[in-house]
């Protein structure tokens, strides 16, 4: 039975949780986890699968409907398909999705599909080997493309391609559009968020002119796609191609934010761009009862701020994305 749903102080109903299952990654994307970073969480501090399942069960009882597994790179977490299966069986959870860099996907796509994962988002910032190596820190384009084909063969549809747009790759948008159109992928262009000095140095690109150019070139119209996230979509009139835009800087979507983030060590972040947080690992390992945890969830949601301040105070937050959950 679902109790009174989670509604924050600004009337937003919280139905979507992004769950980080590891802060480790096999890439070193400068906007996420710069080369040389060593501040990883100790595995003993990670929530185990029983703790995750318990907490997600309590969230689901409060109206949570969607869980997205993130990282770091979630496919590096041992036996992650078992966790997917456990979460997909929770009453009230309607959608289990996963964000991945796809380097491990070729050998795991079929198992993930069988475990109840319904949708995939794949990070791909360039279609050039040298571009991938420069942005993501490793020469892994072939592995990513193989993973995408394995995902398609396993029956994931649509597959969304997440391209973080920066000065380095802004000239590749049209080639990425062509690639996704040919394969039936949904392209999502994402504005670079100033999460740390390294990301800020990579060069923010305002997507509003890009949106206008693509709308005119391809005669795109407004679309609504399933997913529950912040992207705004345009699509071709024949329905064969869709493209999304995530614009936290040029056109923020805070007034409709329905999301919270849980880190691998059990810290609930109420906003990607603010500091409000609640430690659920300490609660659970300290012997808190289910009613006590439910009360803590409700108190946490009351802390959710109205909006981020990335534009007004770009240097306010220093927290890498792998630490928060992508």
Image: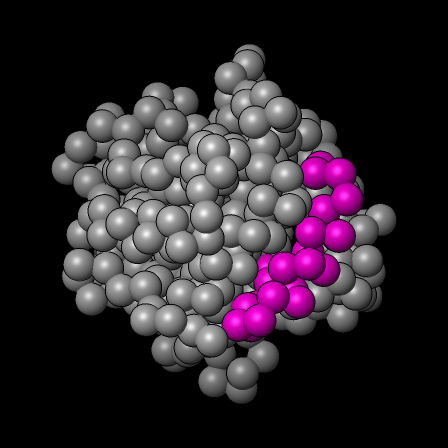
Figure quadrant of residue 160: bottom right
Task: Answer above or below: position of 258 versus 42.
Answer: below
132 in magenta: no
Q: Which residue shows up at 58% across the image and 32% down it? A: 46
From the viewer's perspective, tell me whether residue 122 is left or right of residue 245. Answer: right
Q: Which residue shows up at 46% across the image and 66% down it? A: 61
84 in magenta: yes
Nearest to the observer: residue 212 or residue 249: 249
Q: Which residue shows up at 70% across the image and 65% down it? A: 116
Q: Which residue shows up at 57% across the image and 71% down it? A: 91
Query: In x, y percent, where is residue 25?
Result: 63, 31
Figure quadrant of residue 217: bottom left
Q: Is residue 147 visible?
A: no
The segment highlighted magenta reads 76-97
Query: In x, y percent, where is residue 48?
Result: 64, 39
Task: Answer above or below: position of 70 versus 257.
Answer: above
Q: Is residue 229 visible?
A: yes
Task: Answer above or below: position of 318 versus 298.
Answer: above
* Colour mapping used in the image: one colour
Task: Answer above or below: position of 130 versus 123.
Answer: above
Query: In x, y percent, where is residue 86?
Result: 69, 58
From the viewer's perspective, tell me whether residue 54 is left or right of residue 312. Answer: right
Nearest to the observer: residue 300 or residue 23: 300
Query: In x, y percent, where is residue 291?
Result: 40, 55
């Amino acid at each position: 039975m679902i109790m009174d749903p989670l509604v924050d102080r600004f009337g937003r109903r919280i139905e979507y949780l992004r769950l980080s299952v590891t802060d480790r990654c096999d890439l070193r994307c400068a906007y996420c986890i710069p080369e040389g970073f060593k501040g990883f969480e100790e595995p003993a501090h990670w929530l185990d699968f029983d703790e995750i399942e318990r907490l997600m069960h309590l969230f689901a009882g409060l109206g949570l409907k969607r869980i997205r597994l993130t990282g770091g790179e979630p496919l590096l977490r041992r036996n992650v398909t078992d966790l997917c299966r456990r979460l997909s069986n929770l009453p009230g959870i309607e959608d289990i999705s996963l964000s991945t860099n796809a380097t491990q996907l070729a050998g795991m796509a079929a198992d993930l599909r069988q475990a109840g994962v319904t949708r995939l988002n794949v990070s791909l910032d360039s279609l050039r080997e040298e571009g991938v190596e420069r942005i993501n820190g490793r020469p892994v384009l072939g592995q990513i493309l193989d993973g995408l084909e394995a995902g398609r063969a396993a029956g994931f549809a649509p597959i969304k391609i997440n391209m973080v747009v920066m000065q380095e790759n802004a000239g590749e948008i049209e080639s990425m559009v062509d690639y996704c159109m040919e394969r039936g992928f949904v392209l999502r262009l994402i504005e670079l968020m100033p999460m740390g000095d390294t990301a800020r140095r990579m060069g923010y690109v305002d997507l509003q002119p890009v949106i206008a150019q693509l709308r005119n070139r391809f005669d795109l119209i407004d679309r609504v796609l399933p997913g529950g996230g912040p992207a705004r979509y345009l699509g071709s009139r024949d329905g064969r191609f869709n493209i999304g835009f995530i614009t936290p800087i040029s056109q923020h979507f805070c007034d409709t934010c329905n999301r919270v983030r849980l880190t691998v060590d059990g810290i609930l972040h109420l906003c990607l761009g603010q500091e409000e947080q609640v430690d659920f690992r300490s609660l659970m390992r300290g012997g808190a009862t289910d009613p006590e945890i439910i009360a803590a969830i409700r108190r946490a949601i009351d802390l959710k701020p109205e909006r981020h301040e990335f534009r007004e105070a770009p240097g306010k937050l220093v927290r890498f994305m792998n630490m928060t959950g992508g």
